Image: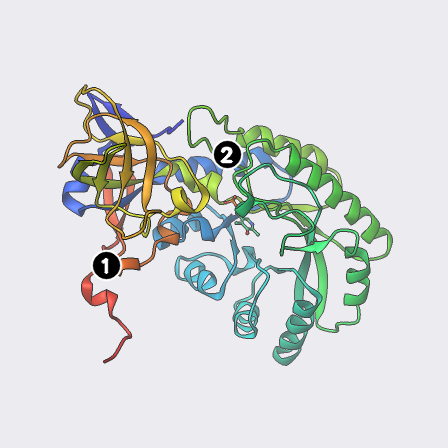
């Protein structure tokens, strides 16, 4: 389930690097990413498409560390961005703007201008107001903007309600039944060119039949648009493939999934794009933390660690499960505990009612499967400096983001 993370003589390792040494040198809490795991997942997507024209646009929001982006950029990966800040990161990391698509329901004028000046591939548009705005900015810049409409195929992705996006009452996309009329009306915009159709129905999808159902609906739409003379040359099928956070979850295979997409898109004269985030970085990262104290209430035993909800919010935000692994397995007996952090919120927990061994004060543990939607959602709540980030490549590791300092906490503030 966790691939490159494994015990060697009871010491937990990432690739060839024992993690206790990283925790001691870099401090805790600290995110650690496996470069090898990230590249393997990207290459699984890329190679499964074979000779079908395709662009894998990694969803930057899952993990936007510059070193991670740079590694993917060197492989020729494209990027799916949802803000000007993400575009800035992609460009700083050496990403090719011609392989960038810009998603999101609320692009500002400044962001649209930045994206057009940078020469991105296409906008995934989510409303007619947005089309008008992009047309206006493109006109001012004397350029033509390529766009896809992000359609909402009204398909229910079976996942947590906060990360399901493809139903009619979600804020995302344009109802697929309305899309042909919107493409027709968009013809009046002088500075826009319809080049694709996109969709993204949700995240952490373990049964990808819902994504295939959406793909079928989108491909049928494209046939109709082409019959009406709209020159669609790409289909963007979004991200959303899930990973196995616990043994009982069966994660879909990337190659099998892509094979299904290939069969549907081949021979149609379309470039296929996809926007995977979690399935590229999720299993490639852990959050290292140190046990500070243990304490008992009448009904519970708590393990208090130095990482908190501000470092990893997934357990409390999505009721997400993350396995917890002691960095040094001592063979002690497991006890059922809540693993909690120092933040002043009852919602500050990393695990609840979990059987955990070898987690006495001073012990180091890894919170598994934390490479996606981990550091990127970290905050300074409770004035806690955000953790360091480390990248492992083979038997080498290096800090790719230093731990924040107290001085960082007050940057930009004044008395
Ligand atoms: C979040 C998001 C993705 C990535 O989703 P994953 O589940 O991480 O693969 C892709 N496209 C869009 C538009 C998104 O909002």
In the picture provided, is 191 more to the left or to the right than 96?
Answer: right
Residue 143 at least partly seen: no
How much space separates mark 1 and mark 2, taking CA atoms?
34 Å
Q: Which image quadrant: the C terminus?
A: bottom left
Q: Which image quadrant: the N terminus?
A: top left
Dot 1 beta carbon under 8 Å from ligand 1: no
| Colour scheme in use | rainbow
Choose between 184 and 75: the one closer to the eye.
184
Q: Residue at x 24, y 70 (%)?
A: 410
| Pair 1/2: label in front | 1
131 is higher (above) or lower (below) than 247: below
Q: Secondary structure at mark 1?
A: loop
Q: Residue at x 24, y 29 (%)?
A: 12
Residue topped by disc 2: 44
Q: Residue at x 54, y 29 (%)?
A: 252
Residue 348 spot, x, y in % from top left: 32, 47
3 is higher (above) or lower (below) than 362: above
How many numbered discs, if any? 2
Q: Earlier in the sequence, mark 1 or mark 2?
A: 2
Residue topped by disc 1: 404
Choose between 262 and 381: the one closer to the eye.
381
Dot 2 beta carbon under 8 Å from ligand 1: no
Residue 89 at least partly seen: yes
In the picture provided, is 411 more to the left or to the right than 24?
Answer: right
81 is higher (above) or lower (below) than 262: below
Q: Residue at x 26, y 45 (%)?
A: 341
């Amino acid at each position: 389930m966790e691939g490159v993370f494994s015990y060697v003589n009871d010491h937990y390792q990432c690739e060839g690097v024992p993690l206790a040494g990283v925790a001691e040198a870099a401090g805790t809490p600290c995110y650690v990413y496996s470069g090898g795991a990230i590249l393997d997942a990207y290459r699984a997507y890329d190679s499964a498409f074979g000779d079908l024209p395709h662009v894998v646009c990694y969803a930057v929001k899952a993990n936007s560390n510059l070193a991670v982006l740079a590694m993917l950029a060197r492989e020729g990966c494209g990027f799916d961005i949802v803000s000007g800040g993400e575009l800035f990161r992609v460009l700083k990391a050496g990403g090719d703007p011609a392989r960038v698509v810009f998603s999101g329901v609320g692009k500002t004028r400044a962001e649209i201008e930045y994206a057009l000046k940078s020469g991105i591939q296409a906008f995934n548009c989510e409303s007619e107001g947005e089309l008008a705005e992009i047309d206006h900015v493109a006109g001012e810049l004397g350029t033509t903007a390529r766009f896809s409409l992000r359609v909402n195929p009204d398909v229910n992705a079976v996942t947590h309600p906060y990360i399901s996006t493809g139903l009619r009452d979600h804020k995302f996309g344009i109802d697929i039944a309305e899309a042909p009329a919107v493409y027709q009306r968009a013809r009046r915009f002088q500075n826009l060119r319809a080049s694709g159709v996109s969709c993204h129905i949700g995240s952490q999808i373990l049964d990808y039949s819902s994504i295939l159902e959406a793909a079928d609906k989108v491909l049928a739409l494209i046939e109709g648009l082409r019959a009406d003379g709209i020159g669609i040359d790409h289909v963007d099928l979004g991200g959303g493939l899930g990973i196995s956070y616990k043994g009982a979850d069966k994660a879909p295979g990337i190659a099998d999934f892509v094979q299904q997409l290939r069969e549907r898109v081949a021979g149609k004269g379309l470039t296929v794009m996809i926007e995977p985030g979690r399935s590229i970085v999720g299993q490639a990262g852990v959050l290292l933390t140190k046990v500070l104290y243990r304490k008992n209430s009448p009904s519970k035993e708590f393990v208090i660690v130095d990482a908190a909800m501000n470092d990893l919010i997934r357990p409390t935000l999505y009721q997400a499960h993350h396995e917890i692994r002691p960095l040094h397995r001592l063979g002690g007996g497991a006890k059922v505990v809540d693993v909690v952090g120092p933040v002043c919120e009852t919602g500050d927990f990393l695990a609840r009612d979990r059987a955990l061994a070898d987690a006495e004060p001073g012990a180091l543990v890894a919170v598994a499967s934390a490479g996606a939607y981990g550091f990127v959602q970290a905050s300074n709540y409770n004035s806690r400096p955000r953790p360091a980030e480390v990248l492992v490549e083979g038997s080498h590791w290096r800090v790719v983001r230093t731990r924040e300092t107290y001085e960082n906490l007050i940057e930009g503030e004044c008395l």
